[in-house]
Image: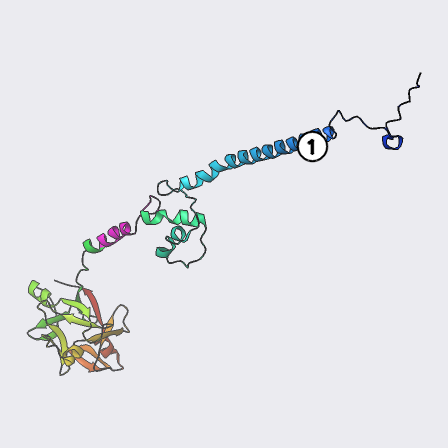
Amino acid sequence: MPQSKSRPPSNSPWENGWVPDTSRVPGTRRLWLAGALAIATVVTCVTAVALTDQRTEAKSPVKDARPAADTSGPGLISYASNSPSSAAAPSAPSGRKSGSPSARPSATTSPKPRGSASSPPAHRPKAPASHPTSSAPKPSTTWRSVRSVNYPDRYWHVKGSYVGLDQVTYSSARRDATFELVKGLADASCYSFATPGGSYLRHREFVLRAEHNDGSGLFKQDATFCPRTSAVSGAVMLESVNYPGRFLRHRNFSVRLDPYQYDSGYRSDSAFRLVDGLA
């Protein structure tokens, strides 16, 4: 009876001549591990992509809300993009220097040209400003009478064509003793005296008289007198433009143009007060 040989140990099959069992496919466990690792990798990638999409969808309403504010009415802030067409338009009428405008300045300045409630259009304040000017009354004419200082009951009075220092007691004399005080014909900083009839007081041959303006330069100078400070409080002295150093004074109750004299009589005779018109 033949003896059975013992099975060699499995840890050294080749050295002992033992052939392993070929009924099972080799590497099956490794394939299962590789497949499980691939499936886990795919699941991880899909999960990451899903989370990324969720975050993108969560942020998208905020991005979509910004351009929606740009379509609102005047006075609301719009988050418009920094394109040159939208940001540079409001800066042109305001006169500011061009630069890199941000979104907020463009939103705050864009309603202004549209005429929002907070900033009315430029044409609205012009109407009330021009209205008072057109309806304002013209300045009234300044009528004055010239009264003597040392003869306070006497005034310049046109009698004929000469000017005398007379007492004015009746209405027609009051009219002839009232003059329109206007800017000097030869010097706007001085005075000229116009009569109600349209004549002017001018000196000729150093005597004051009333004559019509002939438009000559000599007449304008003869009819212009500059006020100077008088030694008498509240009174003035009237100096001739074309004869500096000569002042109007009354002598024998006639108004003349005489050189200045250093005596009290001349100072009193050449001092006059411009009072309200008698007429």
Q: Position of residue 177 (x, y in %)?
A: 12, 68
The colour scheme used here is rainbow
Residue ID for mark 1: 34
Q: Is residue 227 above or below residue 122?
A: below
Residue 108 in view (yes/no): yes
Residue 207 in view (yes/no): no
> Is 2 on the left or on the right of 57, as rendered?
right
Q: Is residue 186 above or below residue 120?
A: below
Q: Is residue 153 above or below residue 251?
A: above
Residue at image x 20%, y 75%?
225
**Quadrant holding the N terminus:** top right
Q: Position of residue 42 (x, y in %)?
A: 62, 33
Confirm whether the magenta stretch covers residue 81. Answer: no
Q: Position of residue 154 (x, y in %)?
A: 15, 69
Residue at image x 59%, y 32%?
47
Q: Position of residue 221 (x, y in %)?
A: 18, 79
Q: State which quadrant residue 227 falls in.
A: bottom left
Amino acid on which the number 1 mark rests in the picture: Ala
Q: How many marks?
A: 1
The segment highlighted magenta reads 115-132
Most foreground residue, 161 or 127? 127
> Is 212 on the left or on the right of 269, as rendered?
left
Label 1: state its secondary structure.
helix
Most foreground residue, 19 or 108? 19
Farthest residue, direction front: 1
Mark 1, Cα crowd under 10 Å, few <14 / some 14-19 / many 20+, is few
Q: State which quadrant residue 171 falls in.
A: bottom left
Confirm whether the magenta stretch covers residue 118. Answer: yes
Most foreground residue, 158 or 87? 87
Farthest residue, direction top: 1
> Is 167 on the left or on the right of 69, as rendered?
left
**Quadrant holding the C terminus:** bottom left
